[in-house]
Amino acid sequence: MLGLGTVGQAVLSALTDNQETIAQRAGGPLNVKRALILHPERHLGHANLITTQWQEILADDEIAIVVEVMGGMEPAFTYIRRALAAGKSVVTANKEVLANRGDELFAAAELSGRDLLFEASVGAGVPVIRAVKLGLAGNRVHQVCGILNGTTNFILTEMAQGMVDYQQALAKAQALGYAEADPAADVDGHDSARKIAILASIAFSSRVVEADVRCSGIAQVQAADLAWGSRLGWVLKPMARARLVAEGLEVASYPAWVGPGHPLAHVDGIMNAVSVRAEPLGEATFTGPGAGGPATASAVLGDLIEAARNLRLGGHAVGCTCYRQLAIFDPARAEDAFYLRLTVRPERTVVSQIAATLAEHRVGLRQTLQAAAADGRGEVVVVTETCRRGDLDRALAHLAQSPSVFTLRPPLVVEAQSA
Ligand code: HSE
């Protein structure tokens, strides 16, 4: 094992608790021989397992499978690549490595004839990699979308249900241990971006990397937005979506409003879900715990058992399934409906001025709502028709110049089924 943090310890516990079942399913017992740790001072137990020397693991021919649960790009990437090159199978939970340099690791696995398995990298306890890669292999996928970050789903759920502000909800997520060492990757949308890159690569058989994903986070969302959303009958979700459009693949990670009929509307707290639209399937949604040691351990163990069975009984896990390279669609041309919130001068003509500016940039208006704001200002919420993001950005740059507009919050996407 590489890493003995929350996930690593949960894997060790489950290996003991489910020992008999695991041995039966893996074709024999699984014994943990070494656990590499970077901070020996933090680990009081497992004295018989722990080492700080990576070479001890790499050079040990008795070690057939390496489980990487340390996270981060380096040294994890190098350790995984070298373990595969040394003829060991690798099970990893590392979305950062997979979403950025997955192709190199698949090549290393192919060369040595070993398995590279990564179910825990997306959706933690929801076995969605296998579902899409194997179970749906006969389909043509049109869209895969999901709630892939437990931390931000928890924060937005808290903000909506408790009407607390962003900072209070984040503090609670941290106190409960949901936020990672660096919460920026969660709240800025990068964690979701990595996961949708991995999922999109599989769903569309075309490699998508983190840099291909248009990304925006939840730090700008205010309690006032959630109150407006609730008036509209919507909830805000940390969305990740990959869809096939005429020009190629559009992949994004962003907060989005969903209506009560959306398959992700009732996925709350740290729960994750993935919804796939495909032919001949139709639509299917997979839901489960998306963060935390035990849920992640569940996925790691499934992979570990597959790798062990393959080594004992012969056989290989399915490797890279990308057989084509689709173009990544220009985000400025992406089409969505949007929610806008502005504070304005309380003049009677202000809504028609906003509508006129939007119309000049080919942005239609579906709905407007108004309320009095503090300091004698007015607040206006606008829901647009489906429009191009680039057109909306130009309209907003124009509106920002208007003497009638005081503040303009960042636009939020309204998902299609929310109308
Ligand atoms: N920080 C991640 C999340 C953990 O909140 O979903 C699982 O990858």
Image (tube, helix red, strand yellow):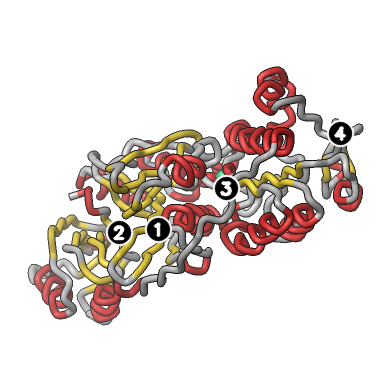
> Is disc 1's CB within 8 Å of ligand 1?
no
Residue drawn where x is 27% and y is 43% of the image: 282
Whole-percent x, y for residue 284 in the image: 33, 39
Q: Amino acid at mark 3?
A: Val
Crowding at mark 3 (Cα within 10 Å: few <14, some 14-19, many 20+): few
Q: Amino acid at mark 1?
A: Tyr
Dot in front, 3 or 2: 3
Residues at circles 2 and 1 in contact by the CB criterion of under 8 Å = yes
**Distance of label 4 from label 2 (alpha carbons):** 48 Å
Whole-percent x, y for residue 331 in the image: 36, 71
Nearer the observer, 403 or 401: 401
> Is disc 3's CB within 8 Å of ligand 1?
no
Q: Amino acid at mark 4?
A: Leu
Residue drawn where x is 22% and y is 79% of the image: 403
Q: How many marks?
A: 4
**Distance of label 4 from label 1 (alpha carbons):** 40 Å
